Amino acid sequence: MDSLPPHPDADDRGVRPFPRLLGLGLLLGGGLLGLLLALSVMLYRAPAGGSAPPVSAAPPPETVARLSAASPETRAAPGASPTRTPRPLRPAVGQKAPPFRLPDLEGVEHNPAEYRGRPVLLHFWASWSPSCRQGWGELVRFAASGAPSHPVIIAVNVQEPWEVVQNFVGQEALPFYLLLDHQGRVNSTYGITVLPTTFLLDREGIIRQVVPGEISAESLRILVKSLDLP
């Protein structure tokens, strides 16, 4: 029996080329589609302008420093109430006054302990304070009255440059000692939170009175009289 002649569209092996080309096209098309889908997913996840920082990234140190400096509260554990930074403790009435040594406008150092045996009036002030400026004249007036029972008066300027203090007092001689607490260490030791603040020490250096705020010459006379000086 004779076989049928080959189909004119068949190749030498007797396989028609059209189904083979169709399968190859579908395979290439599927691969290209998968590549496009993968590229689309990558572009969708990537943020504009570069890679995103990790979710757990901490704020920069300078930001933390600014926040810590601006907040008067200390950080507390989660669920706990924040606590405020404690104020410096002021020496109490009846306690011995803390010793210190500070220079005056001429650079000569003074120590209140040098005047033991006499009452001492410590007056903390600053020229930027309106209350201090208003009370300065009262302090000068009281010191200039020259009563025999007057205590040694020491005005302690708090953290102002020499030039500022000199310009404030001028060239006129003062009837009391003016000392410069440039670093504010004595101010901190005495727990000053209000300017002016005045301490009255007895002959033994014991604190007898503390007066925060402006004080008049008459109030200073009454304050000193409370020591019952002869």
Image (tube, helix red, strand yellow):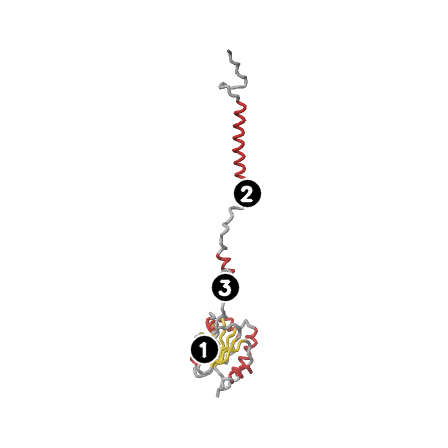
Nearest the viewer among 192 and 132 is 192
Question: Can you tell which of label 1 and label 3 is closer to the viewer?
Answer: 3
- Residue 32 place in picture, x, y as percent: 53, 34
Sequence-first tag of 1 and 3: 3
Alpha carbon distance from label 1 to label 3: 31 Å
Nearest the viewer among 196 and 148 is 196
Q: Is residue 12 above or below residue 214?
A: above
Task: Quickly name the residue at label 3.
Answer: 74
Q: Are marks 2 and 3 in contact (CB under 8 Å)?
A: no
Q: Residue at x 45, y 77 (%)?
A: 97
Labelled disc at residue 44: 2
Nearest the viewer among 105 and 183 is 183
Q: Residue at x 53, y 41 (%)?
A: 41
Question: Can you tell which of label 1 and label 2 is closer to the viewer?
Answer: 2
Q: Is residue 133 left or right of residue 109?
A: right
- Residue 148 place in picture, x, y as percent: 49, 86
